[in-house]
Image: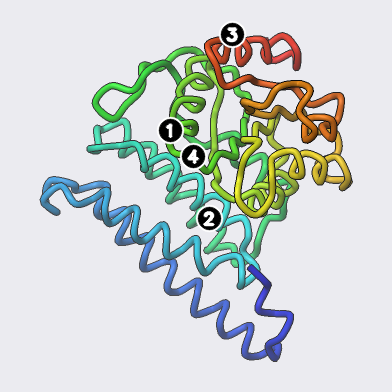
Amino acid sequence: MQDAAAYLDDGIFAQLRQDFLTDTRERLDEMESAASDDKSTGGNALLTIRREGHNIKGLAASLGFSSITIIAHRLEDFVAELTDLTDSHVSDVLVYIDCIRGIVEDGNDPGDSKTAEILRTLPAHTGGSMTGGDFEVKEARRVEVLLVAPGRAVRRMITGELRALGFRVSTTLSPWQALEMAARTQPDLVITSAVMDQLTGIDLVRAMRAIAPTKDLPLALLTSLEADHPDMKRLPDDVAIIHLNRTVTDELGDLVTRFDFG
């Protein structure tokens, strides 16, 4: 989203930023209250957290707080798979809230480098298959993976496999958003579906190789295409290929060795 500062008077933009900070404080208070006292809200705390977090995410970037948008997006990912709030989930959600609140109270965006550092400290699901809205936690590798997969079934399957390897996974459906997120957050690995609307996965990895912030990131392509398919000939040589077939689990596991994530 375009920064509002590009087309607004400085005074108006400053007031909008101040209004956003005031509004965000109130939303964070509501989220914290809901998370801390879920039973008193009739179990609707997750709905409140999702709604207010989404609202914060939608406004932040246009007012110069891209870090808040990225952190709120990660919070959305975190709570999307929960069906209820355990005590540990409440503690995790409060970490996200406190993180956003710290930026709000400072009144300044910390910048991409600091935001990338912050993301690596945030709670994340790791472990094997999901049970009752949670994951069996295994030792995390502290590897940040950005998964670009519009298809729900593929996204869910690959996310589960990556978490079973101990990876921390954030997701996006949009290749355009993926390009921005990768440039800003510098994940350890980007995995993208080959077939997407707007921009193919092959075009996405070619674009990432073409710009300085992402040119050296480890990349992998999820595909059902054969190696001799014309589109595959445009794939950069250093991009790992993950075939969407019976070998997908083994091929994802091979990424640990290929990119030295052990």
Q: Distance between the residues labelled 2 and 3?
A: 41 Å
Q: Can you tell which of label 4 and label 2 is closer to the viewer?
A: 4
Return the residue at label 2: 102
Q: Can you tell which of label 2 and label 1 is closer to the viewer?
A: 1
Compare marks 2 and 1 and give the one earlier in the sequence: 2
> Type of residue at label 2?
Gly
> Type of residue at label 4?
Gly
> Residue 208 placed where, x, y %?
80, 43
Q: For the N terminus, which image quadrant?
A: bottom right
Return the residue at label 4: 151
Q: Tell me if label 2 and label 1 are in contact, CB under 8 Å.
A: no
Q: Nearer the viewer, residue 172 or 262?
A: 172
Q: Distance between the residues labelled 4 and 2?
A: 35 Å
Return the residue at label 3: 250
* Mark 3 surroundings within 10 Å by alpha-carbon count, few (fewer than 14), some (14 through 19), many (20 or more): few
Q: For the C terminus, which image quadrant?
A: top right
Q: Is residue 168 above or below residue 109?
A: above
- Look at 60% across and 67% down and name the residue there: 107
Q: Can you tell which of label 3 and label 4 is closer to the viewer?
A: 4
- Look at 50% across and 65% down and name the residue there: 58
Compare marks 1 and 3 and give the one earlier in the sequence: 1
Q: Is residue 210 left or right of residue 98?
A: right
Compare marks 4 and 2 and give the one earlier in the sequence: 2
